Image (spheres, rainbow, N blue to C red):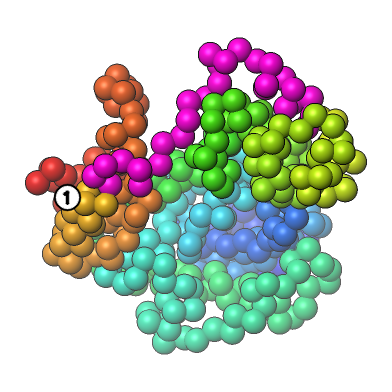
Amino acid sequence: MQYQIITDDLALEELCSSLTAGPLAIDTEFVRTRTYYPQLGLFQLFDGHQLVLVDPLAIQDLSPLWRQIHSQMRTTVLHAASEDLELIRHQSGAMPGKMHDTQLALAFCGHGLSTGFNAMTQALLQVELEKDQARTDWLARPLTERQLHYAAADVFYLLPCYEKLLPELIARGRLAWFEEECAALVARKQPRDAAEEAYRDIGNAWQLGRKELAVLQRLASWRESEAKRRNLALNFVVKELHLFKCALHKPTSLRELDQLGLLQPEIRNHGRTLLRLIDEAVNSDPASWPERLQRLVDFPHYKSELKRLRGKVEMVANEHGLPVELVASKKTIHQYLSWLWKCRDEERLEGDKPRLLTGWRQEILGDLNR
């Protein structure tokens, strides 16, 4: 397995102009421990002829690479693409023009939903890979020969796996379903300004009253914005539990923040901001406070309806030889029930439909009430 390492802008531009027109296998190595956004450490690509490792720490301008990936004429092939898509969007400002995920392809071909890369190469190519470098520091330099070989293998074997899966998808009549699911994954990874809704993701927020939720909403929105601004993981700004405690107890002094168990760096760096936000929320117009959060489990027929829908999904998935979780995970069913029970009639008419009521899922599931 011979690979080329690109470490300067001119070499990258020349490479991108010489790539073949077919599918391009890509992968990224990144570090994301304390940061809000993943930090790109290495970019790998293989067009069937050229196997290349691009060093983003040594290159000033990655735009020739991004143009290849953004092109609607180019199919980029990834495996378990979710985090790679997020990284590409943050680094380049856009998503791949057309993306195929081999993990999804495996699922549509009757394999498990979350088949790992090594399991895929063993099943399709009878190749077992060493995965001992997965958690290495990809921002450290120089990278070792073992790291580079590991990274190169991820795209070298990705393309032949894809070339085996694509004809099988076509033979099964599932290429359109697969492409729809890949496009939906890309759409879900598009950034959304959801800072005002961040409070909904705080654990146990459903326990809070409206005034407390008003406090939590401001605190969670501020934390989201601060984390993005400083490129710092959310809990390295202020821990989630500490936001909940502030919303519940509404402290009015730095001493009370300390008594609630906030860390000294949290109090030192953000204490006065937290107190200001709490005060603003407490004294805001009660009409602006969020409604209390409703848990699906508290609806009267939740258990029986979840059981019924799971049974229908399992039956249909088995009929089509698909993983049950691909057709509908618990989260997907919850999305449908939330739409059905929590949305007003006009919201259901004007807003996006849940995944169970669109595309290939609707095609195979039919009427969910039967």
Q: Is residue 56 left or right of residue 200?
A: right
**Front-lying residue, 80 or 280:** 280
Q: Is residue 353 above or below residue 7?
A: above
Going by the image, does 22 lie left or right of 38? left
The residue that disc 1 covers is: 365
| Horizontal relation, residue 315 to residue 121: left or right | left
Q: Tag 1: residue type?
A: Leu
Q: Alpha-carbon neighbours of circle 1 within 10 Å: few (<14), some, or many (≥20)? A: some
Where, by quadrant of the figure, is residue 8 drawn?
bottom right
Q: Secondary structure at mark 1?
A: helix
Question: Outermost residue toward the left?
Answer: 370
Residue 247 position in % (x across, y down)? 66, 35
Query: Could you say which quadrant of the image residue 108 lies in?
Result: bottom left
Residue drawn at 84 percent across, 68 percent down:
141
**In the rendered image of this protein, does residue 281 appear above or below residue 239?**
above
Q: Is residue 346 above or below residue 146?
A: above
Of residue 116 and residue 353, the one placed in the foreground of this image is 353
Does 68 lie within the magenta span?
no
Q: Quadrant location of residue 72?
A: top left
Coordinates of residue 39 in the picture (x, y in percent) = 72, 54
Residue 56: x %, y % from top left: 74, 56
Asked if the magenta segment contains residue 284, the reply would be yes
Q: Is residue 220 visible?
A: no
Rendered-image quadrant of the N terminus = bottom right
Residue at x 71%, y 32% (from the top left corner): 250
- The stretch of residues the image draws in magenta is 274-302
Q: Is residue 55 visible?
A: yes
Residue at image coords 70%, 58%:
32
Q: Nearer the viewer, residue 300 or 11?
A: 300
Q: Position of residue 46 (x, y in %)?
A: 55, 66
